[in-house]
Image: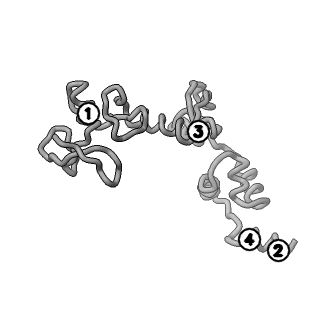
C-alpha cells in the first residue's frame, strides 16, 4: 500500500475499501494499519491510536500507543487544556470517585443525583411561603433542586405560584 498525506487531517492514508482496516469511507490510515499489524488484530470500535510525539506522519511503532477513545480524550484534555482530576466522595452513597477538579461534584453518578433529588421534602405551607416571598429560581437554589422541581412540587400540593412578571413588577414598585 502506498500512503499519502490526507489534506484535511494531516494523517497518512490510502484508499482501499476492501481492506480490513478501512473505515466507512474506504480510507486506511497508516497509523491504524501499523497498530493492527503490531497487535495482530483489527482495532475495536472503542479503540484508537495515539501519536506520542503528536506528529501525524510519524507512524513508527515506537511512536504509536493503543488507547480507548475515552483514555485518549482524557489524555488530550490533560495535556492540551490543563484538565486535572480530583478525588471526591459522593454525598449520597459515600463512595469515592474521581472527577474534573474545576467543578465541585457532590454525586458519583447521575443515579445518585436523581435518588437524592427524590428526597426533596418540604411542608406545603413552607413551600407556599417561599414561592410567594422570592422568585422560583431563588427558592430552587435554596432547596438545592431545579426550578422545575419546585414547580412540580407546587402543582402536587395545589399551591398557586405568582404569575409571569410578578417579581419584575414588584421590583419596579419598590
What is the C-alpha distance between the residues marked 2 and 3? Answer: 45 Å
* 114 horizontally vs 174: left or right: left
The residue that label 4 is drawn on is: 166
The residue that label 2 is drawn on is: 172
> Quarter holding the N terminus?
top left
Q: Quick one: label 4 or label 2, which is nearer the N terminus? A: 4
Secondary element type, mark 1: loop
Q: Position of residue 86 (x, y in %)?
A: 61, 30
The residue that label 1 is drawn on is: 43
Task: Using the image, determine if residue 144 lies above or below residue 84.
Answer: below
For residue 82, which numbered disc appears in the image? Answer: 3
What is the C-alpha distance between the residues marked 1 and 4? Answer: 59 Å
Q: Which of labels 2 and 3 is toward the front? A: 3
Q: Position of residue 73 (x, y in %)?
A: 45, 39
Q: Position of residue 143 (x, y in %)?
A: 70, 46
Q: Quick one: label 2 or label 3, which is nearer the N terminus? A: 3
Q: Quick one: label 2 or label 1, which is nearer the N terminus? A: 1
Q: Which of labels 1 and 4 is toward the front? A: 1
Secondary element type, mark 4: helix
Residue 114: name its quadrant.
top right
Amino acid at each position: 500500500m502506498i500512503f499519502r498525506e490526507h489534506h484535511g487531517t494531516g494523517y497518512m492514508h490510502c484508499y482501499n475499501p476492501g481492506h480490513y482496516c478501512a473505515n466507512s469511507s474506504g480510507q486506511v490510515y497508516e497509523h491504524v494499519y501499523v497498530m493492527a499489524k503490531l497487535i495482530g488484530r483489527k482495532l475495536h470500535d472503542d479503540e484508537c491510536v495515539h501519536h506520542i510525539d503528536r506528529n501525524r506522519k510519524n507512524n513508527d511503532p515506537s511512536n504509536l500507543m493503543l488507547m480507548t477513545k475515552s483514555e485518549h480524550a482524557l489524555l488530550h484534555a490533560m495535556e492540551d487544556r490543563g484538565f486535572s482530576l480530583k478525588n471526591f466522595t459522593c454525598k449520597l452513597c459515600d463512595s469515592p470517585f474521581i472527577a474534573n477538579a474545576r467543578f465541585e461534584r457532590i454525586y458519583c453518578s447521575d443515579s445518585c443525583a436523581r435518588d437524592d433529588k427524590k428526597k426533596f421534602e418540604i411542608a406545603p405551607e413552607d413551600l407556599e411561603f417561599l414561592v410567594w416571598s422570592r422568585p422560583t429560581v431563588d427558592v430552587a437554589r435554596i432547596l438545592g433542586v431545579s426550578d422545575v422541581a419546585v414547580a412540580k412540587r407546587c402543582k402536587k400540593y395545589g399551591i398557586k405560584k405568582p404569575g409571569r412578571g410578578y417579581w419584575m413588577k414588584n421590583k419596579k414598585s419598590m
